[in-house]
Amino acid sequence: MIGTLARDALLVSLAVIAFGLVIGPVAIARGKREWIPLSYAAIYTNFLLVTIATVSMVVALVTHDFSVAYVAQVGSRATPLLYTVISLWGALEGSILFWGWVLAMYAAAVVWINSKRPGNLVPYAGTALLGVMLFFAILLIGPANPFGVVSPVPADGPGPNPLLQNHILMAIHPPLLYLGYVGMAVPFAFAVGAMLSGEVERDDWIRITRRWTLASWAFLSAAIIAGMWWSYEVLGWGGYWAWDPVENASFIPWLTATAFLHSAMVQERRQMLRLWNLNLVVGTFVLTILGTFLTRSGIISSVHAFTTGTIGYFFLGFIAVVLISALVMVAGVSDRLKTVGHFDSPASRETVFLLNNLFLTAFCFTVLVGTLFPLVAEAFRGVKVSVGEPFFNKMTLPMMVALLFLMGVGPALPWKSASPDEVKHKLLPPVIGAVLFAAVGLLMGIRNVYGVLAFACTGYAVVANLREFYIGSAARRSAHGEGWFTALTRLIAGNRRRYGGYVSHIGVFFVALGIAASSSLRTEREATLEPGQSVVLAGRTARLKSVWGREEPQRSVIGVTLEIMNGDVVSGKVEPRMNFYPMSQQPVPTPDVKSYAAGDLYANLQAFQPQGKNATVKLIWEPLVPWIWFGGGIVVLGAIVGIWPNRRRSAA
């Protein structure tokens, strides 16, 4: 019953999308403005229908309806309720259904917020979104149909992939990733709408697009940080970024979206980089579809990848259609996108933003080539080529350091041009921060060049960005007699976009320091201990208290309790364990982490004696890793500040 309802909803959804795709352009072509609401109604109706299908799948999972193919694939009566629900996005078909629902939600929100805007920008943008939704609707009734019928109906299922039910971040990382990835379809739709409606010469569409891009960028930023945290907490290797192809696939569009958010300000303020911004928006969307292809085509091996079916060919076809269509449209309007403004001086904010864009796109190209080259080499030469961490670090570390430096220079310089005296006044004081942070890095023990440079450039940028808050707050105190806190909050509220960006910069600085310190100063030790014995690492003593086991509904667990000693006093504990799932041949290690302000004590269970006589544990000291997660939160907070509407502007 549930499967039939959902299948019917998806079939009707396909018809509704097709209707909306036809009625919108016809209404515009014939000047029938009264027909355009029918196109909007198709978007709302599609959201309702896909919601019905998605809710039906959740009900089927919770009620263990194994007659539904997807439930039979990922469901299990022993799986806890939370992991049963979130297994909705734990495999290919369910993830495509969830993707379709998020896309339908975005489309409905775009139309709801902008439907009263005059002109044809929004109708064409809605049509573009309907075109993207058509592709996913075809997938859902074709190669990614989650509502196939299973006969005979099995009594139980295997449950989700063990790695996907081993940590609560499974409930957080994938939805954030979808909200970020899918959200990039909205800027693409507005770009298409601007080109088709003839409004591409106006800068109004870029303002609308920038807000939607910033929202999607915030979700994608949070998703990347959550994914790093998940890898760190679950996989047991003590790291958080391995340049895995699917990790790269989420990072690449983040880079181009970041470039767009900066260059869009140049277009708004100086009427420059119009064609460049159009290409960035289109490219970001194409890169999200490419990333989805890499994940779901089966051409790569990864803990993130779904390797099933022929769906990869559909994605390749869709990428080709989008690229060809976009190239034709961009070529058709390129002669109308001539730059009005020009660069007045190398010492200007727009020059820094241009350099920022060049480094970000070079970064993007490097990661893209390193990710795709092994696939291309194997396809054409039949030879497996490995491009791993050494290549990515060697190629990208100089660009990372340069970007950190530019994050300090950009806020300090004015638009248009700065006099030599102004350049000295703005750019010399932050050198104090560079020297101070470099000294701190050296005192911590960092000796590699890029680690010290990362600390130095971060120190420079920290002082430069905090100085902007100080100068603005001091000006408000002088003008209005306000206290420091009041002046600061009203300063931020008065220009949320600018100071929200600076807040995000500060979050990036925390992340950069955490990565530089943990990459340079990580230490580890492995030891086999009997109860009562201790091991010392980075000045911290861990004593094995016990080896224990327990049975849980969906798994068996073997763990150890390690007491963290401060002299003779127990100051904390960590309990790394191994989880044994019926469907898995190998145990799934689950490390435990004790966090301090200065870093993490990371413990992983390597082996154990069946009688609990001893256990082999690996301890890792990870300096400043908590700063990465904290900094990621600050990045997202800055984006929220930037998105938050200004009351005066809203009233206007």
Image (spheres, rainbow, N blue to C red):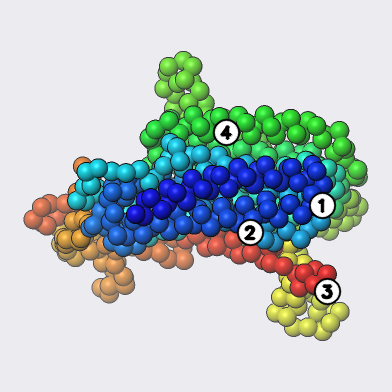
* Disc 1: which residue: 119
Front residue of this view, candidates 313 and 291: 313
Closest to the camera, between mark 2 and mark 3, is 2
Q: Residues within 10 Å of mark 4 (few under 14, many from 20)?
A: some
Cα distance in 3D space between marks 2 and 1: 18 Å
Label drawn at residue 6: none
Q: Who's the residue at 47% across and 32% down the image?
A: 312
**Discs 4/3, front:** 4
Q: Nearer the viewer, mark 2 or mark 1?
A: 1
Q: Is residue 277 left or right of residue 634?
A: right
Give how far apart the Cα atoms at labels 1 and 3 are: 42 Å
- Side (left or right) of 598 relative to 72: right
Q: Which residue is mark 3?
A: 475
The amino acid on which the numbered mark 3 sits, given as a three-letter code, is Ala
Which is more foreground, mark 1 or mark 4? 1
Of callouts 4 and 3, which one flags the residue occurring earlier in the amino acid sequence? 4
Q: Which residue appears at 65% of the width and 49% of the height?
A: 186
Q: Position of residue 500 (x, y in %)?
A: 69, 63
Q: Tell me which numbered mark, 4 or 2, is placed earlier along the sequence.
A: 2
Check disc 4 and give the amino acid type.
Phe
First in sequence: mark 2 vs mark 3? 2
Q: Position of residue 50 (x, y in %)?
A: 50, 53
> Which numbered disc covers residue 318?
4
Distance CA(mark 4)–CA(mark 2): 24 Å
- Give the quadrant of residue 143: top left
Q: Secondary structure at mark 4?
A: helix
Tell me what residue is drawn at x 91 percent, y 43 percent.
340
Q: Earlier in the sequence, mark 1 or mark 4?
A: 1
Q: CA distance from mark 2 to mark 3?
A: 39 Å
Kindly indicate the quadrant of the structure image that contains residue 544.
Answer: bottom left
